[in-house]
C-alpha cells in the first residue's frame, strides 16, 4: 500500500472513530428515555463484552489468564468502564449531550494533573503548564459556578468525574496491563466482561426500575453498546498501535465538535455563547499540552538509536497488536 493510500486509510479510520465516539452522548441521551442510568450502563457493558468476546475467540485468541492480570483488569474495568459509563448516564439526566462531549474532552488535562500528583511527570514546560491552566479555566467558564445553578448543576460535575476516572484508568492500565504481551482484543474483551460483573452487582441499587423499551430506546442501546463501546474501544487501540498515540489523539479534538453538532441537529439542543467560549478555551488548552508533549517526544525519538521507541507491539504467536503504553499527554478522551 502506498504512503498516500495509508494516509487516506488512517484519516478515514480517525474520522470514523471520531463520529462513533462523538455520537456516544447522543445515544446515551436517547437510551435514557426508557432506561435508568444504571440500566444503560449494564446493557452497554454486557453487549459490548459479548461482541468483543466473540471477536476474540473468532480470531483465535483467548481471554487473559492468571489471578494477577485479572485483578488488574477488574480495577481498570471499574475506572475505565463501569464508573465513567454510569457517571455519564447519570450526568446526562440534566446535562445536554453536546455539553457532555465538551466536558469529556478534559480527560487529557486530568491525566497530566494526575501525573504531577503521582510524580510520574517530573515537571511541565511553560507551554504545557499554560495549556493545563487554560484548559481548567475553560472548564470553569462552562460550569459558571458564580451563577445560581451553574451550567447544569450536578450533572456537569458527574461528567467531569467520568473524565477524571478515565485519567485514573489510563494511568493504571499503562502501569499494569499494556505492553505486557497480551493481545488488545483479549484485554478489551476481558475488561468489558469484568465491567459487566461490577455493574451487575450494583443493579439492585438502582437498576431494577421499570423500563419502557420503545424502538428508539432499543436501537440507541444497541448502537451505544456495539458501535460506541465495543468497536471504538478496540479501534482506538489499533490506531494507537498502527499510527501512534499522537495521531489517535486527534480524535480528542473532533469528539466534542461531533457531540455538539449532533446534539444541536438531532436533539435541538442550544448552547449558550459562554459554553461555546468555554469549549474553545478547553480545546485550546488541551492542544497546547499535546503539541508541547509531541514536540518533546519527537526530539527524544530523533536522539535515540534506531529501533528504540517503536510504538507498536505484536504478539509473536498470532500477529495481534498488543496494547502499548501511550504517553500521558497523548491519551485520547474516552466516552
Image (cartoon, rainbow, N blue to C red):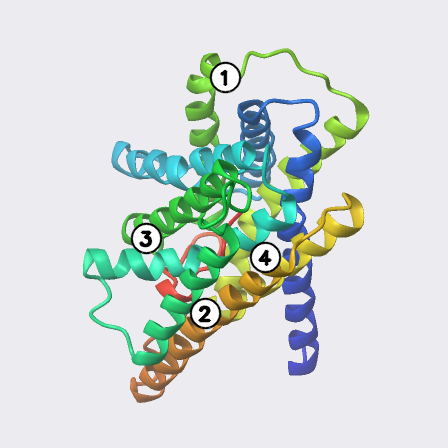
Give the residue drawn at x 53%, y 65%.
Answer: 248
Of marks 2 and 1, the one in the foreground: 2
SS label for mark 1 = helix
Residue at 58% across, 51% down? 101
On residue 206, the disc is 1
Number of marks in picture = 4
In the rendered view, tell whether residue 148 sits above or below residue 324.
above
User: Residue 159 location, x and y as percent?
Assistant: 49, 43
Residue 239, position as x, y percentages in the image: 55, 62
Distance from disc 1 to disc 4, alpha carbons, whole Å, reads 31 Å
Q: Quadrant of the N terminus?
A: bottom right
In primary-sequence order, the first of circles 2 and 1 is 1
Residue on which the image places disc 3 = 171
Give whichever of 204, 230 is nearer the camera: 204
- Measured in 3D between alpha carbons, the distance from the residue under mark 2 to the one under mark 4, in whole angstroms, is 15 Å
User: Is the residue under label 3 in contact with that under label 1 (CB below 8 Å)?
Assistant: no
Please tell me whether mark 1 or mark 3 is closer to you in this view. 1
- Distance of mark 3 from mark 4, alpha carbons? 29 Å
Decide which of 329, 197 is in the foreground and name it: 329
The answer, for residue 26, to whether it is visible in the render is: yes
- Name the residue beneath numbered marker 4: 275
Q: Which circle's residue, 3 or 2, is located before the other in the chain?
A: 3
Q: Which residue is mark 2?
A: 285
Q: Is residue 7 above or below residue 119?
A: below
Instruction: Count residues near mark 3 (Cα–Cα under 10 Å), then give few for <14, some for 14-19, many for 20+.
Output: many
Q: CA distance from mark 2 to mark 1?
A: 37 Å
| C-alpha separation, residue under disc 3 versus residue under disc 2 | 20 Å
Amino acid at each position: 500500500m502506498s504512503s498516500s493510500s495509508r494516509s487516506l486509510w488512517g484519516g478515514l479510520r480517525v474520522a470514523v472513530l471520531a463520529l462513533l465516539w462523538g455520537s456516544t452522548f447522543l445515544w446515551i441521551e436517547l437510551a435514557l428515555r426508557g432506561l435508568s442510568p444504571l440500566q444503560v450502563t449494564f446493557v452497554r457493558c454486557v453487549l459490548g463484552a459479548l461482541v468483543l468476546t466473540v471477536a476474540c475467540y473468532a480470531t483465535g485468541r483467548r481471554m487473559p489468564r492468571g489471578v494477577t492480570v485479572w485483578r488488574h483488569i477488574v480495577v481498570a474495568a471499574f475506572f475505565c468502564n463501569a464508573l465513567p459509563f454510569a457517571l455519564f448516564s447519570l450526568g446526562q439526566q440534566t446535562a445536554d449531550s453536546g455539553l457532555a462531549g465538551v466536558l469529556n474532552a478534559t480527560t487529557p488535562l486530568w491525566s497530566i494533573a494526575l501525573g504531577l500528583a503521582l510524580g510520574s511527570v517530573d515537571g511541565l514546560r511553560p507551554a504545557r503548564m499554560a495549556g493545563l491552566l487554560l484548559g481548567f479555566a475553560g472548564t470553569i467558564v462552562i460550569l459558571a459556578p458564580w451563577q445560581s445553578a451553574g451550567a447544569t448543576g450536578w450533572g456537569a460535575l458527574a461528567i467531569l468525574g467520568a473524565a477524571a476516572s478515565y485519567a485514573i484508568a489510563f494511568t493504571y492500565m499503562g502501569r499494569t496491563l499494556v505492553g505486557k504481551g497480551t493481545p488488545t482484543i483479549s484485554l478489551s474483551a476481558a475488561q468489558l466482561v469484568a465491567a459487566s460483573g461490577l455493574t451487575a452487582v450494583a443493579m439492585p441499587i438502582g437498576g431494577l426500575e421499570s423500563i419502557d423499551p420503545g424502538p428508539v430506546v432499543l436501537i440507541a442501546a444497541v448502537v451505544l453498546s456495539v458501535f460506541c463501546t465495543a468497536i471504538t474501544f478496540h479501534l482506538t487501540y489499533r490506531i494507537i498501535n498502527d499510527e501512534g498515540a499522537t495521531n489517535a489523539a486527534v480524535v480528542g479534538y473532533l469528539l466534542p465538535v461531533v457531540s455538539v453538532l449532533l446534539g444541536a441537529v438531532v436533539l435541538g439542543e442550544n448552547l449558550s455563547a459562554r459554553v461555546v467560549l468555554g469549549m474553545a478555551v478547553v480545546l485550546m488548552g488541551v492542544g497546547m499540552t499535546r503539541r508541547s508533549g509531541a514536540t518533546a517526544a519527537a526530539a527524544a525519538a530523533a536522539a535515540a538509536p534506531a529501533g528504540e521507541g517503536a510504538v507498536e507491539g505484536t504478539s509473536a504467536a498470532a500477529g495481534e497488536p498488543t496494547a502499548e503504553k501511550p504517553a500521558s499527554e497523548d491519551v485520547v478522551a474516552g466516552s
